Amino acid sequence: MEKLIAELQQIVPFKGTTDIGDLVLIVAKEPQMLVYALVTDITRDTTRKDEWWHLGLTFLTVPPQEITWTLRTTQMTGMEIFTMGGEKRFVKAVNLAPTLSRPPEKSNFDDAKGKSKSSFLKRVK
C-alpha cells in the first residue's frame, strides 16, 4: 500500500487540505479499489474527545454512492494511511487547479503557418 501511495504522489497533483467540494482519491487494499469521490460535507464529531470529523462523500461510481466516514484530520488529508475494519485506506484531495509554475507545453506546430513538427496528427483543410 505504501509503495502505491508513493507512486500516486508522483503522478497525481494532491492538495494539502480537504474542503467541501473537493475531489478526493480513495485507495483501499481490501476490497481493492482506486476511486474518486466528491466531498459533500465536513462536520465536527462532538461526541469524541479528540478531533474527529464526519466526512460526507459521494463516490463517483455508477450509480453514485453517498457515504459518511468519521476520520481524523490526518486521515482525511492523506497524512496518514489508516484502517477501517482492519483494512488499509488512504484519502487525499486532488488539486484540479492548473499549476502556474509548470512551463507551458510545447506545441506540435512550429509556426503560424501550421506546419507540423513530426507529429502523428495530420492537418486537414
Image: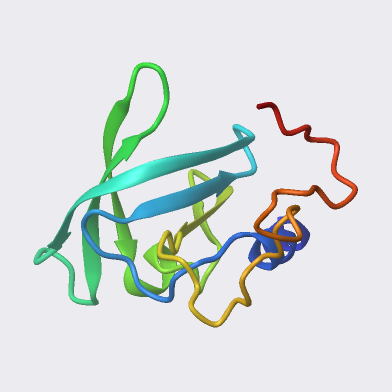
Which residue is painted at 60% across and 76% down in the image? 102
**Nearer to me, 42 or 82:** 42
Color encoding of the figure: rainbow
Q: 116 or 28: which is nearer to us?
A: 116
Q: Residue at x 37, y 51 (%)?
A: 23
Residue at (31, 56) in percent of width and height: 22
Of residue 118 and residue 21, the one placed in the foreground of this image is 118
Relative side of 125 to 7, left or right: left
Extreme residue in the bottom direction: 101
Whether 108 is drawn above or below 64: the answer is below
Question: Which quarter of the figure is the N terminus placed in?
Answer: bottom right
Furthest-top residue in view? Answer: 63
Residue lying at 44% horizontally and 64% vertically, measured from the top left: 95
Image coordinates of residue 67 in percent, x first then y, are 27, 36
User: Quick check: 7 left or right of 48?
Assistant: right
> Which quadrant holds the C terminus?
top right
State whether residue 54 is above or below residue 16: above
Instruction: Note whether 95 is above or below 85 in the view shown.
Output: below
Count of picture labels: 0
Residue 105, given in percent of the width and then of the height, sits at: 67, 65
- x%, y% of residue 13? 55, 65
Residue placed furthest toward the front: 113
Q: Farthest residue toward the right?
A: 118
Q: Nearer the viewer, residue 125 or 17?
A: 125
Q: Tell me where residue 96 appears, x and y as whole percent.
A: 42, 59
